Image (tube, helix red, strand yellow):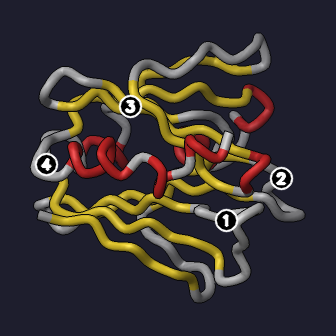
Amino acid sequence: MNNSIPSQNLGLLENLIGKKIISVQRQLFKSDMDLSEFEQKGDGPVEFTISDGSRMHFFSNTEAFSVGIASGAMSRYGDSYEQRDVSKNSFWAERLGQEVKQILLLKAMDSTDEFPGEFGVELFFSNGTGALIEYRDEENYPDMIQVSEKHTGGPCVVRKISQ
């Protein structure tokens, strides 16, 4: 499953540069719905529909301790997840329709070939906002995908993708 890590899908990410995300779908773990900002902080894959009509999605790649990425629609998870269009929530409303200017791939400092640790894909938009799709596997966040405004964790290796 290491072929789903961001560094193995650079073409897919490069295709996003200069385009706009027009809608965002999530499948959210129902038990997380009591969290504040659960549409971002809750566990579950994220799917983008892009201005060229293509779709891509992000998911947990537990074997690689990484975020996974693939083209097309996300697979349907089980009954413990609820699918939601989160495009109009306060987080995504200010990011949708904005051109993606730059993408950073975030990788753990202690990563290895066996455990690549590509834990984040951070997008930067033309209006100055950002979005981080992040794989979390720690005591408070066991094996999950979250969305936040930016990377606030410790040091990491960064690979930049831009025009």
Query: Could you say which quadrant of the image residue 93 lies in?
Result: top left
In the image: residue 128, left or right of residue 155: left
Tell me which label, 4 or 3, sits earlier in the chain: 3
Tell me which label, 3 or 1, sits earlier in the chain: 3
Please identify the quadrant where the N terminus is shown.
top right
Question: Residue 152, image x and y in percent?
Answer: 54, 78
The residue labelled by disc 3 is 56
Tell me which label, 1 or 2, sits earlier in the chain: 1
- The residue under the point 48% across, 50% down is 8
Q: Which mark is residue 98?
A: 4
In the image: residue 136, left or right of residue 129: right
Residue type, numbered disc 1: Gly
Q: Whole-Å distance between the Cαs marked 4 and 2?
A: 32 Å
Query: Could you say which quadrant of the image residue 103 lies in?
Result: bottom left
Residue type, numbered disc 4: Gln
Residue 67 seen by the camera: yes
Q: Dot 1, crowdedness within 10 Å: few (<14), some or many (≥20)?
A: many
Tell me which label, 1 or 4, sits earlier in the chain: 4
The residue labelled by disc 1 is 117
- The residue under the point 32% across, 59% down is 123
Residue type, numbered disc 3: Met
The residue labelled by disc 2 is 142
Helix, strand or loop at mark 3: strand
Please identify the quadrant where the C terminus is shown.
bottom left
9, above or below 155, in the image: above
Helix, strand or loop at mark 1: loop
Tell me which label, 4 or 2, sits earlier in the chain: 4
